[in-house]
Image (cartoon, rainbow, N blue to C red):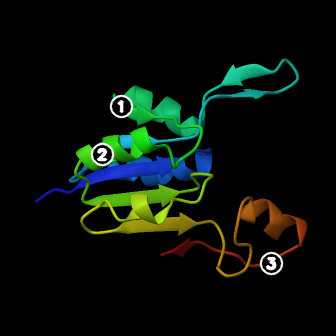
Amino acid sequence: MSWRVVFFGTPSFALPSLEKLTQGPDEVVAVVTQPDRERGRGRKVVPPPVKGFALQKGLRIFQPEKIKEAALLETLKGLEADLFVVAAYGQILPKALLSLPRHGAVNVHASLLPKYRGPAPIAWALLNGERETGITTM
């Protein structure tokens, strides 16, 4: 039996998780990522890496400015997901959203929590000269 999965992620760090999920047996029914943003000196609008991959795979994509948008909550509720997988999404998911999937949510964080919780854990580990770090799945 395959599960219906909604994936939340934005930067390239999230790509291996999404890539593995798309290889089956479960079905990725939607991808939620941050909106396209201006980048670089030319301030060119660039999509997040996760969006590019999702487009290549023909996945349904949502890019809300704020994850608490009521319309998004209703849409995701209608997808009847079994599981949410979160990898470096960029916003804290509210309880109302986390309560939707039948089997809950899994979060992948790029540090050994509680150390370097929050954004940019890899950058902070490098800046602080850490000799060892890792990934936390919760």
**For residue 126, what is the image quadrant?**
bottom right
Badge 1 marks a residue whose secondary structure is helix
What residue sits 66% from the left and 25% below the top?
A: 46
Label 3, label 2: how far apart the Cα atoms are: 36 Å
What residue sits 49% from the left and 43% below the top?
A: 69
Q: In the rendered structure, which disc, 3 or 2, sits on the residue that comes first in sequence?
A: 2
Residue under circle 1? 57
Q: Where is the N terminus found, in terms of image quarters?
A: bottom left
Q: In the rendered structure, which disc, 1 or 3, sits on the residue that comes first in sequence?
A: 1
Query: Can you give x and y, in whole percent of width and height, for residue 60 in the image?
Result: 35, 33
Query: Mark 1–mark 3 contact, CB under 8 Å?
Result: no
Q: In the displayed image of the protein, which residue is found farthest to the front?
A: 70
Is residue 19 found left or right of 11 in the rendered image? Answer: left
Q: In the rendered structure, which disc, 1 or 2, sits on the residue that comes first in sequence?
A: 2
Residue under circle 3? 131
Residue under circle 2? 28
Specify few, some or many for label 3: CA neighbours under 10 Å numbering under 14, 14-19, or 20 or more.
Answer: few
> Which three-letter amino acid code belongs to the residue tagged 1?
Lys
> 78 or 24: which is nearer to us?
78
Badge 3 marks a residue whose secondary structure is loop
> 88 or 104: which is nearer to us?
104
Badge 2 marks a residue whose secondary structure is strand
Query: Can you give x and y, in whole percent of width and height, for residue 105 in the image?
Result: 39, 66
Mark nearer the viewer, 1 or 2 = 2
**For residue 112, what is the image quadrant?**
bottom right
Mark nearer the viewer, 1 or 3 = 1
Query: Can you give x and y, in whole percent of width and height, for residue 74 in the image?
Result: 33, 44
> Which three-letter amino acid code belongs to the residue tagged 2?
Val
Is residue 92 found left or right of 21 in the rendered image? Answer: right
> Which three-letter amino acid code belongs to the residue tagged 3?
Arg
> 112 or 105: which is nearer to us?
105
Query: Mark 1–mark 2 contact, CB under 8 Å?
Result: yes
